Image (cartoon, rainbow, N blue to C red):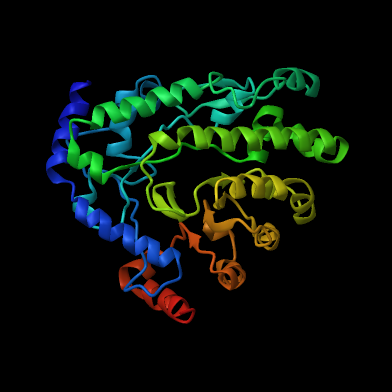
Amino acid sequence: MNGELERLLALLDRTLDCERQLRIHGLHVRALSYDSVERLPLILEVPLPPECPFRPFRYREAFDDPDKMLFNELVSAFGVSILAHDRIGDDLPYTIRANCGTVIVASIFGGRVELIDDNPPWVRPFGDADTLRRACDCDPLDFGRGLCPKILDIYHRYHEALAGFPNVKRSVKLVLPDLQGPFDTVELLRGSEIFVDLYEQPDWVREMLTMAAGAQVGFARHLQPLLTDSEPGFAHQHGTAMRGNILIRGDSSVNVSADMYRQQIAEHDECVMRSLDGGGIHFCGNGQHLIPSMMELPSLRCIDFGQPEMNDLDAIYAQASTRRIPLIRVRVAEEELVSGRVLVLCLPRIDGLK
């Protein structure tokens, strides 16, 4: 084991508070369920304090070394830190994952994964539709392809590394990696031409989305024995709790119209969420126009925001609250946080839905 990782795990095994994690988990579950809560869960993104004795490895180093990846997940990920949590005192759930970027499902279909400098991996799109068709003439449930073996090795290594540190093992949840969503995966493989294909080759796009959805569901199920998200109907992604068992990334979907989403993409998002007993949808940017269509999906359990400030959250909440669908990763202004005004703004909404 990497010496730095062993020192870190020994420290965390002495300092992590498993009982507090159980209380934090309960608070998240109640808030996500629209139950009355004493306050909303609060997660702060803060830099590591200068005196912190541990610093993350470069991403490229960690990508090729499961011990370094585990080290980084414990020290700093998504702007939060399990290591520094005792100094911050917020409601951070302790989660770690195989951090291999957005390309995992695309790699099953022969996506050409590239790392440039110290950035997370990307997929170089196929040059034309015929080349992509030939590349996708494969079994979408063959998890010996692409990055899948690497992902499995990472989780096995996590379990092996944590075995000697029982308090860390009890306190920290192993959660799904980023499996994107059907349309995001196909966009990675095809590039921006996919937006033309939606009009010119809708049947082929539907075929591709069906394959991508099947691979996502299949690999999520394949990973389940290695995960420790244990509350039925709840999971963790992006460093926080969510309702549902899978988070679909819909960043590419915000670039299509509401009608196109409803006609071509929505059924595949619903297929993934239904197959895994409910899930959420994430998007960055302004996805306001897609919310009514998303609210029609029976298996939708939450909406996750990458850039909430670009959306009218009050209008979205008015739609979501009729189905008790929580909005997660909503950011507030510093003044509202420091003054405590965020509690005044939010708690009456929750209490009014009892």
Eyeballing the image, is 44 above or below 34?
above
Rendered location of residue 126, percent (x, y): 71, 21
Tell me if 130 is positioned left or right of 245 in this view: right
In the rendered view, tell whether residue 309 sits above or below residue 284: below
State the residue lying farthest toward the left: 14
**Eyeballing the image, is 115 above or below 228?**
above
Across and down, in percent, residue 245 comes to: 49, 48
Side (left or right) of 92 relative to 52: right
Percent of width and height locating residue 130: 80, 20
The residue sitting at 83% across, 38% down in the picture is 202
Where, by quadrant of the figure, is residue 13 drawn? top left
- Report the front residue among 286 and 245: 245
| Res 56 visible | no
**Depth check, front residue: 173 or 190:** 173
Q: Position of residue 306 (x, y in %)?
A: 52, 51
Quadrant housing the N terminus: top left
- Where residue 335 sits, quadrant-wise, is bottom left
Q: Residue at x 58, y 30 (%)?
A: 105
Q: Does 201 sit above or below residue 275? A: above
| Residue most extreme to the right | 200
Say whether residue 7 is left or right of residue 39: left
Q: Residue drawn 44% across and 37% down?
A: 224
From this viewpoint, is residue 17 visible?
yes
Marks counted in the figure total: 0
